[in-house]
Amino acid sequence: MFRFLPEQASAHAADVDWINNLITDLSVFFTVAIVGSMIYFAIRYRRKGGVDHDTPRIEGSHTLEAIWTIVPTVVCIFIGYYGVAIYKEMRTVPANALNITIWGQKWQWDFEYEYKDAEGKPQVKKIGGKNVEWVVPVNRPIKLVMQSRDVIHSFFIPAMRVKRDVIPGQWNYISFTPIKTGKFPVFCTEYCGREHSNMMANLSVVSEAEYYRWVQDRSAEMAMAGLAPSERGKQLYTAKGCNACHSLDGSRVLGPSFLKVYGAKHKLTDGSEVDVDDNYIQESILHPMAKIVAGYSPVMPSFDGQLNPDELAALIAFIKAQDGSAPIVAAPPPAADEGWDKLTPAERGEKWVKGKAIPACTSCHSLDGSKLVGPTFKGLYLREEEMEGAGKVKADDAYIIESILHPGAKIVKGYQNMMPPVYGALKEQDFKDIIEYLKTVK
Ligand code: HEC
Ligand code: HEC
Ligand SMILES: [Cu+2]
């Protein structure tokens, strides 16, 4: 009864629905029990036949008092505990999450995807407008970092069970892992003016390979798209003179180095600790005196009024990019071969493995059982393997595709995270071909 929720399209949706349904059921139960007995008693003990009766005097019952104190207390603590536990999980962003920046404005959503191309150069895809369709890969954690350009909006994807206010001058984020492909509506849920009810977008969840193709397709780009935010931030870093006081290599100048600063915890002069996140970096730039890093002098000038929101976001993107982690690199699809379609899947797979994919898989993976930089392909298919800190995994189709697209997600025990994430342009058919070939390497 009372199940009106949309389909569950994210990994945490089932947990959210479970607690939500529990609260609904408890509310319905107590509403019926309380209002029902109220109505029953009103009818049962109504004034009958125009005669007034003396009601008996009833003393209180300690047992009853104890029951209706303890039971609701336990129920509330249980709900509170589970609510917090699920919320905490929703707010913890896995390290391999795909970052997307979202700007809300009257009355549309704009999306910015920064990624690296085959040469390792940061690129950006920007899209926006009414009912814009934005794309994410399935089964990959997504982090949406959001800010508003004007008034307060709220970003809501019902099917993913995520919602967050989008506020001018303040960064918020939501995180989820889509588990289903398909199209899902996005709404604004904070009344923001005349076109509020039309402030919508369409989330399209597709396969990994399709996502990489989409993100590299520039035909639907907004005209304003130019430099990737982190590249723009790099220019501002010197143009605004940050480089005079902040190094990128860990060395101390007047201020702290930007090397691996994002995500760190810093002690302040007042003894408290801060997380170096988007909002803290923004505050440090606009109001340097608000929080002073311990061991440094308060000499940083304020840049309030000298940077527009996009420039601020660019500086944050640049500082984030100093963390040493490799964002997903998307190589351009290799040119088509003569007679490619006449080959069997395993033959095509062999070509990919032995050199059509650049770099060749065989430069790191042997076919004869010997150990190179990576594990051998001999007998790999359906092999059970121990992962670094993730238990045992069976090398099935899904795992092999994940290993190629997100080499960092699971590391084979005894090996290093050395496989480059450059094969993003491979298509679904290519993965099938590679797997067909790997099956034959016994
Ligand atoms: C005159 C030197 C100077 C300049 C120029 C300067 N800063 Fe700073 N900055 C500092 C000092 C000193 C601190 C540490 C004390 C503090 O927290 O204010 C600091 C702190 C910071 C922090 C917090 C760092 C941390 O480790 O917690 C950030 C972020 C930052 N600056 C960004 C910038 C950016 C971006 C620019 C250029 C737009 C810039 N700074 C220009 C001196 C400078
Ligand atoms: C620069 C070296 C390098 C290249 C090139 C490379 N890999 Fe890897 N690969 C590794 C390393 C190192 C590991 C083990 C660490 C890990 O799990 O990420 C690995 C792991 C794997 C795994 C998981 C293996 C297992 O035993 O569980 C698969 C599958 C895989 N690679 C497929 C490929 C394919 C297909 C290609 C070519 C399209 C390729 N790799 C190219 C280095 C490489
Ligand atoms: Cu709005």
Image: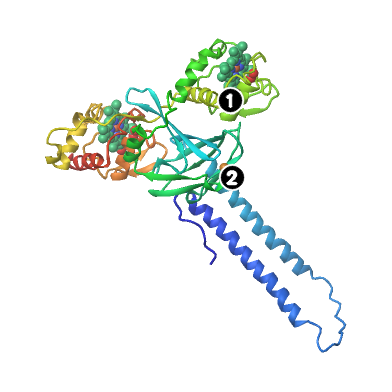
Q: Position of residue 71 (x, y in %)?
A: 68, 63
Q: Position of residue 248 (x, y in %)?
A: 49, 16
Q: Position of residue 371 (x, y in %)?
A: 25, 30
**Quadrant of res 283:** top right
- Colouring style: rainbow
Q: Which residue is at a point 62% across and 28% down the rendered structure image? A: 274
Residue 389 appears in the picture as rendered: yes
Q: CB at mark 2 closer than 8 A to ligand 3? A: no
Q: Amino acid at mark 1?
A: Ile
**Quadrant of res 280:** top right
Foreground label between 2 and 1:
2
Q: Secondary structure at mark 2?
A: loop
Q: Position of residue 403 (x, y in %)?
A: 32, 37
C-alpha distance separating marks 2 and 1: 34 Å
**Quadrant of res 307:** top right
Q: Residues within 10 Å of mark 2 (few under 14, many from 20)?
A: few
Residue 270, compared with residue 65, is above or below; it is above
Q: Amino acid at mark 2?
A: Arg
Residue 168, compared with residue 76, is above or below; it is above
- Residue annotated with mark 1: 281
- Residue annotated with mark 2: 194
Q: CB at mark 1 closer than 8 A to ligand 1? A: yes
